[in-house]
Image (spheres, helix red, strand yellow):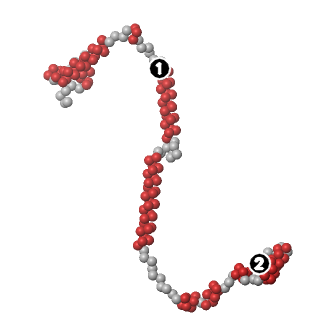
Amino acid sequence: MFGHLKAADFMNLVEGAPLPEKRRLHLESCARCANTQKSIEDVRNQVTAMQMTDDEYVPEPDWSEFRGDVRNTLLSRSVKRETASRNWLGGMGWRPAAAWGFSMALVFGVMTSMVFWNQENIEPAAQPVVPATEMVEAIGFEAVAGMAQTDVFDDLLQLNESETENLRRLVEDMTRNGERPQ
């Protein structure tokens, strides 16, 4: 394509401008460029041969109405575009939300697998079994005896009927006098 005529050269020929000598010689010797020149001249001749008659008259459009229609259409498109972009993700679309969710799931999965992997690799330390007699000697007999003592509720469960009745009367007397039972 380096030696062939360019579009600007063909336009110069159509408009009647002269070609430089080198390009004119190429046009005369190149069949491809001569065919292109001939087809351009044929199209130009057909366009100039067309004459509009009175029944083919196309009226001039109302340009002010056209501009108003174009403006209204563009404004309605921009409003639709703005409302479409304001979705539940704040206009970002679903791709960033999906990427964020995937990354959080990945982080959670990695952390969970690390926890379980570390638990499998840790062997529990062997704790020596201490006989009860040695434990009592180490803690002290008084502490073990204190653990064996009963509490108030155990004592209440062991009351007989007369003791239960006396306790009930005592509590009733205290509540009538405004005292709190202790």
**Residue labelled with disc 1:** 63
Crowding at dot 2, Cα within 10 Å, few <14 / some 14-19 / many 20+, comes out as few
Name the one closer to the observer, 16 or 33. Answer: 33
- How crowded is the residue under tag 1: few (<14 C-alpha within 10 Å), some, or many (20+)? few
Image quarter in which the C terminus is found = bottom right
Is 84 drawn above or below residue 42 in the view shown? below
Secondary structure, mark 1, is helix
Which residue corresponds to the image point at 15% horizontal and 20% vertical from the top-left? Answer: 28
Tag 2 secondary structure: loop
**Front-most of residues 80 and 181:** 181
Question: For the residue marked with disc 1, what is the amino acid?
Answer: Trp
- CA separation in Å, label 2 and label 1: 100 Å
Residue 115 lies, with reference to residue 131, above or below; the image says: above
2 to the left or right of 156:
left
Look at the image and tell me in which quarter the N terminus lies. Answer: top left
- Kind of residue indicated by mark 2: Gln
**Which residue lies at the image location 57% right of the left edge and 89% below the top edge?**
136
Q: Position of residue 65 (x, y in %)?
A: 50, 21
- Image position, residue 27 (x, y; %): 17, 22
Q: Is residue 155 above or below residue 19?
A: below
Report whether 88 appears left or right of 143.
left
Q: Which mark is residue 182?
A: 2
Q: Residue at the top extreme?
A: 54
Is residue 138 among what the camera can see?
A: no
Residue at image position (52%, 89%) is 131
Mark before the other along the chain sequence, 2 or 1: 1
Residue 89 is situated, as x and y percent measured from the top left of the image, at: 50, 46
The x, y position of residue 14, in whole percent, is 26, 18
